[in-house]
């Protein structure tokens, strides 16, 4: 039953053939006509139940489909009406209707009927394959496949019982496990051969490419540097490979690790990057060029960054190994 006390009404504009939600106070007494603005303006004020009717609004012929005190429910009913005509016109339309279905009770499956009296399988013994690299002749020996026994074997009485019951897999029960053992051992033999080939190749490769430094590292005097520079005239590639193998989390960490392995702590105080202040120049050494090339090959960086890192490493050399804390304690005293 239609009521003037409901705040919103879902109406069908007959001539325009559209469904909208409007405040109930816009509808006439007989619920056949209403005054409404154009549809663009309607969307801006239709959710206001106390919006006043204006004289310039047009009059429309309507059919009231349903009513509700909640705008969101009325809007939902209007949206539903676009696809179906089953919209309640009574006051109970704004009450949520929940349709429940009865739960289907399905009979329990009797698994005992599906079970068959199959023979119990015995546990398969582990296959012992010697993977020792010392005995290379073990790769050429595989146990004979002719004397293999099946994983399980039924007695004659059990086979006769199944044949009487019409079991289709009774005749082939013994042949299938025997074939499985044959294929499995062949695959294991092939896999073991491939692993041994790869292992021997890795051992040979690692032995040939073993990294070594061509001179004595951790320089502590000028004589060590002089000997290293003479060796680097012909052994730059070996030293560059050694520097690349040191590695680091970044280009800065990589370069600092290399310099720490080249220079002793006290001896590094006699060097700086440019050679100013009466110190020796690091950039004039052949080793500096090789070290820079190794870092450039290992990281995405530039020569300017590498030179800047090396300069800072020599500049703040006295702060390493607790030098900064000792200086601060001396100043405090």
Image: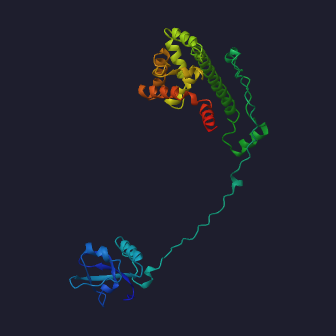
Question: What residue sits 36% from the left and 71% below the top?
Answer: 79
In which quadrant of the rendered view does residue 205 lie?
Answer: top right
In which quadrant of the rendered view does residue 80 lie?
Answer: bottom left
**Location of residue 259 in the rendering, given as x and y in whole percent from the top left corner:** 54, 23
Question: What residue sits 38% from the left and 74% below the top?
Answer: 75
> Front-most of 131 and 36?
36
Q: Quadrant of the N terminus?
A: bottom left
Q: Residue furthest bottom?
A: 29
**Location of residue 299 in the rendering, given as x and y in whole percent from the top left corner:** 47, 28
Residue 245 visible (yes or no): no
**Location of residue 138 in the rendering, given as x and y in whole percent from the top left corner:** 70, 17
Q: In the visual, does 120 lie left or right of 302?
A: right
Q: In the visual, does 297 lie left or right of 33?
A: right
Q: In the visual, does 225 lie left or right of 26?
A: right
Q: Residue furthest front?
A: 333
> Front-most of 170 and 106?
106
């Amino acid at each position: 039953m239609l009521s003037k006390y409901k705040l919103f009404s879902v109406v069908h504009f007959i001539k325009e053939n559209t469904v909208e939600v409007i405040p109930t106070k816009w509808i006439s007494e007989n619920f056949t006509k209403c005054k409404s603005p154009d549809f663009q303006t309607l969307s801006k004020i239709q959710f206001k139940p106390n919006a006043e009717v204006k004289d310039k609004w047009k009059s429309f012929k309507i059919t009231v489909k349903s009513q509700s005190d909640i705008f969101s429910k009325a809007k939902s009913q209007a949206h539903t009406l676009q696809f179906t005509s089953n919209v309640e016109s009574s006051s109970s339309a704004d009450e949520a209707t929940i349709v429940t279905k009865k739960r289907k009770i399905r009979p329990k499956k009797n698994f005992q009927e599906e079970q068959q009296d199959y023979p119990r399988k015995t546990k398969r013994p582990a296959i012992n394959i010697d993977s020792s690299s010392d005995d290379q002749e073990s790769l050429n020996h595989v146990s004979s496949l002719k004397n293999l026994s099946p994983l399980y074997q039924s007695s004659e009485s059990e086979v006769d019982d199944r044949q009487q019951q019409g079991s289709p897999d009774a005749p082939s029960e013994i042949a299938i496990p025997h074939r499985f053992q044959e294929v499995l051992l062949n695959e294991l033999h092939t896999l073991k051969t491939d692993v041994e080939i790869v292992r021997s190749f890795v051992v040979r490769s690692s032995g040939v490419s073993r990294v070594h430094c061509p001179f004595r590292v951790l320089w502590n005097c000028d004589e060590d540097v002089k000997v290293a520079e003479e060796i680097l005239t012909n052994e730059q590639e070996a030293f560059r490979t050694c520097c690349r193998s040191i590695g680091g989390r970044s280009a800065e960490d990589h370069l600092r690790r290399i310099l720490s392995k080249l220079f002793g702590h006290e001896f590094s105080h006699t060097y700086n990057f440019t050679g100013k202040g009466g110190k020796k120049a690091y950039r004039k050494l052949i080793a500096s060029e090789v070290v820079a090339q190794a870092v450039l090959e290992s990281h995405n960086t530039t020569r300017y960054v590498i030179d800047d890192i090396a300069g800072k490493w020599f500049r703040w050399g006295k702060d390493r190994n607790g030098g900064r804390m000792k200086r601060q304690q001396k100043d405090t005293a």
